[in-house]
Each structure stands twice: as structure tokens, then as C-alpha cells.
Image: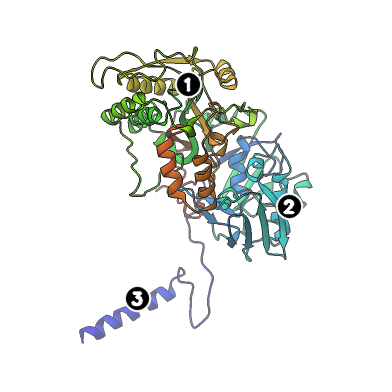
């Protein structure tokens, strides 16, 4: 009897579900599609639009329009908060690291109602591939060919293996030929642009393959005549959402009722070394300097909790039991490593010999204030040639390693971090560290000339965490002249997917640079507009179908 009651109750619940609009079945076998029952917000929502920029989302390189493009366009993939590639316009793909074949979704149409085809994807990616002014140009420099295979497949061949290449393909896709229309290029995103009598707005895209939007269905575009006026428009309430860096020479003073949301980034803060110094070219010395740092404390204090500590130059840090990743300081271990390194006759391994290659600097290596930043020493002088050792760890010792830690004086957060790093190193016997804070122009000049001991740097890595510019001989960001055959082999094995953990182990052994943290990006939004707001690293509108209005 009790079993019968349970079955009857289950049948009643199933019937109730069938009658509900959420289940999509009403009467008999007739099926109904999903019902849009989200409570639509009537609150004002404004986005900045810099009209002087191009209307082609692949070629527009203005920071203001970045957020706008994320509402209008989609890529083959979206990069998630743990830096994996999540399918968007791509249904599936296969590849061996060098040749990739991407199969497109069959249910995607543009705002115009035209279906997405392989020709559209090829046109969009080639626009980025062949235009150096595109903000996506550097992602495709190793692409040998892009071709359509029928109407729904795209084949891309690389000049060298990169198993993580799909992470780079969140490049916006638009309909072939529509970028020449003089208006917005035709996109597939959740919103579509609509021109009114006096103003452009974004309205819900009825053809969107993602289904119904969340609570925000209407967005007002606020025209900017200058690229630097978005923040003031946010402060006045005309703009409702924007990106604004926190660890910045001039951090935004937004004030008022604001929600601040962090997203993971590939912006690496690190310490670089001059390999012409025989002691700094010792991997043991570099490991000692790394072990002396409390990355956790640096992130919680000087970096304003807007950074995640890192020992390896990838984000997030790998969860592998074979790796020892201590984010706190280990002063005793650092002292022992330093003593052993300074007692070495060679002062470093053959893999650490400096490179004679003069590094090339280009303006587009820098994103904002600190990308690829470097530093300088006064003369690189030390009070020892590296063959003698301090009198002892834990006792008064002569200075055998003098370091000038160069940092950009325009960024107060980085100066404070450099001072804390210097204090940690000065606590080790045998080391004397001073902070050399210089204006940005001087800072860059010394970087270019290789005139530094150690520098506090920041660089915006790509989402596949390509480290060759930093760690390859002659790399565009390898200002200190690091060169190592084992590191080159380890990087190649990681990029091909053959031995990722092997790269991590090689890096921890060599410590060619000392990672500190990955800075977090910041999105600011007027309070009370959205609940359940969870943006992705490169998409402020990720998950917008789950947005709800605050009660």
C-alpha cells in the first residue's frame, strides 16, 4: 500500500509538471517551446560607445567599445574563468595541435536572419590575421592557413604545435561582407543594434541561439566623443557598466552606489633578472629569492586583493600533488638555497649562461601601463665575484649580492609591492636590496638598454599562456637575456600537450623569472541593476541569460 501511494504521488507531480509552462507540454502530445518567464527589468542601462572607432568588431581597437562588442558578437569559443575554451559558435572540433578542424553549430543565425557559414568565420579570422592594427592580430601570427571545408567546417593549420589554440578563438565573428555596410557588422550575439530617431539602442536578438535573455532587454548606447570620457559618464550614471583597472597609476574613483566584480586575467606580475650578473644567472639564487617572498601577503596588501598569487606563470595554478607551490614565505629554505648557491664554484648552471641576443622592443608589447615592463641597476655591482660565501646563514654576513630593484614610479601599488619584496630579500644574510623607482619613460629606456639588476614587470599574456616571448632566446620580452635548452624543450612539450607537468617542474627548477601574481580585471556596475552577474575573463555579458532583477 505504501509503495502504491509513492507511485501515485509521483504520477501527480509528473502531471503537474506537464501542465506547467516550464515543462513545455500542454495537453495531449502537443509540445511547446520554452516560455520566456523572466521578469524583465525596466531600469535604465547604458553602455559607452566611441563612435569614432570602426564598426568592424575585429578591427576596432578602442577599449571603450570592447564591452559593447561583447554584447553584440560571439566567437567560436569563450574563455572561462579557469581558462578553458567553452564552445559557443563551434559545435565540436578535432586537432593534433597543428591542424584543427572546427564544426560550426547548425542553429546559429545572424541578426539579419542569415545562417552562420564557414565563409563567415574565415572572413572574420582573416581580417584579424592580415591586419596588424587588429587587437586580435598577435593571436594568429602562427596561423599558416584558414580555409572553409564545405559550408559548416573551418580548417586552421599552425606553423608550430599549440594544443591550447582554441583558447585564442574568442575572436568575434561577423557575416561576410557586412562590415562594409557603414553600420554595425552583422553579428550573432544576444543583442542587436537598433537605430531610433535620435539614439541607438541594443535590443534582444530574437534569433539568438542561446535562448531568452535575462532581465536586461534594452540598453541605451551613450555616445562618447573622446576615448577618456567613459569614466565620467559612469560617475554621472549615464553609463551603467564598464571595465576599470584597479592596479593602475590612476585607479578610478567611482564613488556612489557601485558593485565591483573581479574576473581572472592573464596579466602576470613578475620579477625579471639581468643574466649578465653571474650571481643572478644562478638558478639557486633565483630560487632563493623566490622562496623568500610571501605572494599571498603581497596580494592581500599592496595589490589590494585584486590579484591571485602565482609561482608558475599560468592561471589558475595547477592542482598537481607532485608540485610544491607554497604561496607563503619560506625564509629558512630561502637562506639555505642562497647559501648553497653562493658556495658554488660556478655560480650557475650552463643552461643559465646569458644570451648575446639584443631584445627587440615594440610598442604593442605593452598593454596599458605595465605590460612587458622591466628595470635597471646602477652598475650591476656586487661585493663578491660569486666564488666566496657569506659567513653564515642566520648570522651577520658580508654583502655578496647587491640588487637595485627597478619599478615604475608612476604606479604606487607596484612601488609598494617592490618595497615589500625588498624587505623580504634584505632579511636574508648576504643580500642588500634597494628600490629604484623611476618614471615610466626612464623605466622603459633602461629596460630597452638592458641596464638593470632586477625589475618589477607586468605583461599581458595570451589565454594559451604562451611564454616564449619571456623565456625564449631572443624573445621580445626576454630583456634579461635568459637562454636554456631544457626550458625551450619543456615549453615545446607543453605546447604540444606531450608533457605539461614536465614544463612546470623545469620552470620551478630554473626559475628564469619569478612570478608574483596574476592581476584580476575589474568590472564596475551600478548597484541594484543585476543579480547573478558572473562575467567571464573576456566577456562582460557571459551568462546573461541567468541575470535577474534585484528584489
Q: Residues within 10 Å of mark 1 (few under 14, many from 20)?
A: many
Image coordinates of residue 74 in percent, x first then y, are 61, 52
Residue at the image point whose x is 71% and y is 44% from the top: 56
Residue 197: image quadrant is top right
Mark nearest the camera among 2 and 1 is 1
Q: Is residue 446 above or below residue 323?
A: above
Distance from label 2 to label 1 (Cα)? Answer: 49 Å
Secondary element at tag 1: loop
- Residue of label 3: 13
Whether residue 196 is visible to the viewer of this picture, yes or no, is: no
Residue at the image point whose x is 78% and y is 46% from the top: 180
Mark nearest the camera among 3 and 1 is 1
- Foreground residue, 241 or 69? 69
- Foreground residue, 397 or 83? 397
- Residue of label 1: 277
- Foreground residue, 42 or 211? 211
Whether residue 394 is visible to the viewer of this picture, yes or no, is: yes
Q: Residues within 10 Å of mark 2 (few under 14, many from 20)?
A: some
Task: Name which of mark 3 and mark 2 comes first in the sequence.
Answer: 3
Distance from label 3 to label 2 (Cα)? Answer: 51 Å
Q: Which mark is residue 123?
A: 2
Q: Is residue 389 left or right of residue 154?
A: left
Amino acid at each position: 500500500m505504501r509503495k502504491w501511494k509513492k507511485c501515485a504521488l509521483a504520477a501527480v507531480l509528473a502531471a503537474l509538471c506537464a501542465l506547467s509552462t516550464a515543462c513545455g507540454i500542454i495537453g495531449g502530445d502537443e509540445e511547446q517551446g520554452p516560455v520566456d518567464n523572466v521578469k524583465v527589468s525596466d531600469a535604465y542601462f547604458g553602455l559607452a560607445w566611441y563612435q569614432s572607432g570602426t564598426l568592424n568588431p575585429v578591427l576596432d581597437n578602442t577599449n571603450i567599445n570592447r564591452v559593447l562588442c561583447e554584447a553584440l558578437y560571439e566567437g567560436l569559443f569563450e574563455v572561462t574563468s579557469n581558462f578553458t575554451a567553452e564552445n559557443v559558435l563551434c559545435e565540436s572540433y578535432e586537432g593534433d595541435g597543428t591542424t584543427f578542424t572546427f564544426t560550426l553549430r547548425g542553429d546559429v543565425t545572424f541578426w539579419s536572419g542569415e545562417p552562420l557559414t564557414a565563409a563567415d568565420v574565415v572572413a572574420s579570422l582573416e581580417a584579424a590575421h592580415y591586419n596588424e592594427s587588429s587587437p586580435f592580430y598577435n593571436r594568429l601570427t602562427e596561423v599558416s592557413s584558414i580555409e572553409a571545408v564545405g559550408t559548416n567546417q573551418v580548417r586552421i593549420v599552425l606553423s608550430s604545435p599549440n594544443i591550447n589554440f582554441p583558447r585564442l578563438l574568442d575572436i568575434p565573428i561577423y557575416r561576410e561582407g557586412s562590415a562594409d555596410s557603414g553600420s554595425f557588422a552583422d553579428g550573432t550575439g544576444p543583442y542587436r543594434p537598433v537605430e531610433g530617431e535620435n539614439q541607438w539602442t541594443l535590443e534582444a536578438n530574437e534569433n539568438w541561439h542561446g535562448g531568452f535573455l535575462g532581465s536586461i532587454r534594452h540598453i541605451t548606447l551613450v555616445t562618447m566623443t573622446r576615448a577618456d570620457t567613459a569614466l565620467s559618464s559612469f560617475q554621472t550614471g549615464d553609463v551603467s557598466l564598464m571595465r576599470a583597472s584597479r592596479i593602475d597609476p590612476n585607479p578610478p574613483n567611482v564613488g556612489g552606489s557601485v558593485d565591483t566584480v573581479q574576473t581572472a586575467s592573464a596579466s602576470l606580475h613578475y620579477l625579471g633578472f639581468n643574466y649578465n650578473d653571474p650571481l643572478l644567472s644562478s638558478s639557486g639564487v633565483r630560487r632563493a629569492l623566490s622562496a623568500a617572498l610571501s605572494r599571498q601577503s603581497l596580494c592581500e596588501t599592496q595589490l589590494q586583493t585584486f590579484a591571485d598569487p602565482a609561482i608558475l606563470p599560468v592561471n589558475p595554478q595547477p592542482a598537481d600533488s607532485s608540485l610544491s607551490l607554497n604561496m607563503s614565505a619560506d625564509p629558512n629554505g630561502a637562506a639555505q638555497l642562497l647559501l648553497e648557491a653562493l658556495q658554488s664554484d660556478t655560480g650557475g648552471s650552463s643552461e643559465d649562461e646569458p644570451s648575446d641576443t639584443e631584445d627587440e622592443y615594440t610598442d604593442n608589447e605593452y598593454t596599458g601601463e605595465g605590460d612587458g615592463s622591466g628595470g635597471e641597476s646602477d652598475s650591476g655591482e656586487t661585493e663578491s665575484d660569486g666564488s666566496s660565501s657569506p659567513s653564515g646563514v642566520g648570522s651577520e654576513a658580508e654583502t655578496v649580492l647587491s640588487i637595485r630593484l627597478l619599478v615604475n614610479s608612476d604606479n604606487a601599488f607596484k612601488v609598494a609591492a617592490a618595497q615589500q619584496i625588498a624587505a623580504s630579500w634584505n632579511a636574508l644574510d648576504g643580500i642588500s636590496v634597494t628600490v629604484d623607482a623611476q618614471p615610466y619613460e626612464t623605466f622603459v629606456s633602461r629596460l630597452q638598454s638592458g641596464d638593470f639588476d632586477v625589475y618589477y614587470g607586468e605583461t599581458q599574456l595570451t589565454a594559451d599562456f604562451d611564454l616564449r616571448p619571456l623565456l625564449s632566446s631572443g624573445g621580445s620580452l626576454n630583456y634579461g637575456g635568459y637562454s636554456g635548452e631544457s626550458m625551450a624543450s619543456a615549453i615545446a612539450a607543453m605546447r604540444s600537450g606531450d608533457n605539461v607537468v614536465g614544463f612546470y617542474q623545469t620552470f620551478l627548477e630554473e626559475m628564469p623569472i619569478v612570478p608574483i601574481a596574476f592581476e584580476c580585471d575589474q568590472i564596475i556596475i551600478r548597484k541594484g541593476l543585476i543579480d547573478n552577474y558572473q562575467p567571464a575573463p573576456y566577456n562582460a555579458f557571459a551568462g546573461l541569460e541567468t541575470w535577474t532583477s534585484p528584489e
